[in-house]
Amino acid sequence: MKANEFIIHLEIAGKKYPVTLRRGDVQTERRARLAARRVQQMYLERKNIFSKAVDDKDLLAMVAIQLATDMIPLEERNDTKPLIERIQRLTADLERYLKENH
């Protein structure tokens, strides 16, 4: 571990997981702790629904699928590739126009 790093331990499903963070990166630490609480909450909700019929590994897989499903629309909304391609086409058109008219 580097001198500018430290480890926090986040508990999910009764097990602690070490997470290495940069010192002074308060936002990332806050987000990591919030994420762990959210995963734990979702895990417990599913554990209550499925009782002992489903093991922890499967419950955590269900949580992962739900979180990934929730994240996909955010990624799609933030996809700038079509916009970049459009700007590049417009730039090429503008350059071609300027060459032809000067």
Image: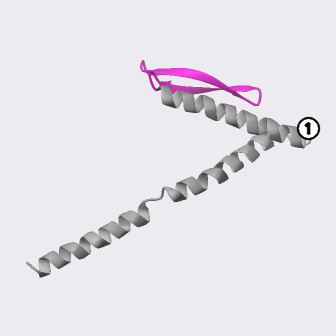
Q: In the shown orientation, is residue 32 left or right of residue 78?
A: right
Q: Is residue 15 magenta?
A: yes
- Residue 38 x/y as whole percent: 68, 36
Q: Is residue 46 left or right of residue 34?
A: right
Q: Name which residue lies at 76% across and 31% down.
A: 13
Q: Which residue is mark 1?
A: 52
The outermost residue toward the top is 3
Question: Type of residue at label 1?
Answer: Lys
Q: Residue at x 82, y 41 (%)?
A: 46
Q: Could you say which is closer to the camera, residue 33 or residue 19?
A: 33
Residue 3 in the image, given as x and y percentages of width and height:
42, 18
Principal SS element in the magenta part?
strand
Q: Which residues are magenta?
A: 1-25
Most distant residue in the left direction: 102
Q: Residue at 47% x, 59% y: name it.
A: 79
- Residue 88 placement: quadrant: bottom left
Q: Residue at x 25, y 73 (%)?
A: 92
**Image spot of residue 27 (x, y percent):** 49, 30
User: Which one is in front, 89 or 6?
Assistant: 89
- Using a 10 Å C-alpha cutoff, classify the residue at mark 1 as few (fewer than 14 neighbours), some (14 to 19) or many (20 or more): few
